[in-house]
Amino acid sequence: MAQQRGPSTGALRLAFFGPAGAGKTALIRRYLRGSFEEQYQSTVEDFYSLDGVPAELRFGDGPGGTTRRVEILDSGGGHSFPAMRRLAMQRSDAVALVFCPHERDSFDVLRWLRQELLEACTDDAGKPPFVVVANKSDTSPSDESALALRTARDTAVGEWGATFFETSALSGHRVAELFAALFRLGVPPATEQGSQLPARRVQRTGSADEPRHKMPVSEPKRHSCVMS
């Protein structure tokens, strides 16, 4: 049976995937709360929700534009819980694939996740649109990371046909622009109106199961890259 996405639930579902330490949680919290938290905590799977797309990002006919509820999935960066990850991919309306160009092999994990996204979303609903995000642009690049960034951009734009963002959760650089792009990628026409509410955080955990494929693992995070 084909997985139903946003229109059947009345919610716009966004999902963030990427290797551990790429800054997925920091990007979401920077957008929702306007703040940055220095301390790193590994994520299993978290959910956030808004009661509508912010007014300045609404689009469509009518004075209010689209104001459907928004649900944001913050996925874990490990290779545990593959069934949860596949289900989230199938149910998402738009996806952000996040990596850190300063961490070796980070983009290799993103290649793996994109392939899993393509394999997971082969039903009638089709694969959700996605963007590629190079986070931690506030960190001074080395020659190696600058090359990794160029390679990632060429691959994402030239081979995958995706929009490419360089962001910083630490400074907020291009974070609002990233979310605006996700809203526009994922939301279909709607007329229901609502008001934006503060973020609501719910954590869900489950029993680990073995993945069918082994996800590439990035090298341990360097201190300069933690959660920016």
Image (cartoon, rainbow, N blue to C red):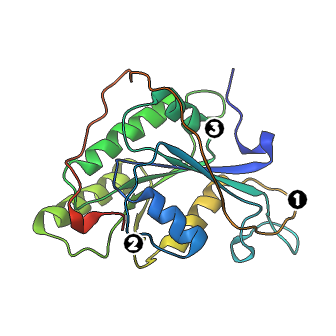
Residue 168, disc? 2
Q: In this view of the protein, which residue sits in the foreground, 123 or 197?
A: 197
**Residue 66: horizontal and vertical position, in percent?**
79, 63
Disc 2 is placed on an element classified as loop
Q: Of the residues shown, which amino acid type is indicated by label 2? A: Ser
Q: Of the residues shown, which amino acid type is indicated by label 1? A: Glu
Whether residue 42 is visible here, answered yes or no, is yes
Disc 3 is placed on an element classified as helix
Q: Quadrant of the N terminus?
A: top right
Mark positioned earlier in the residue sequence (1 or 3): 3
**Image-quadrant location for residue 7:** top right
**Residue 11: horizontal and vertical position, in percent?**
75, 49
Label pair 2/1, CB-CB below 8 angstroms: no
Number of numbered callouts drawn: 3
Report which residue position mark 1 lands on: 192
Mark positioned earlier in the residue sequence (3 or 2): 3
Q: Residue at x 85, y 72 (%)?
A: 64
Report which residue position mark 3 lands on: 91
Mark 2: few, some, or many residues within 10 Å (few <14, many ≥20)?
Answer: many
| C-alpha separation, residue under disc 1 versus residue under disc 3 | 21 Å
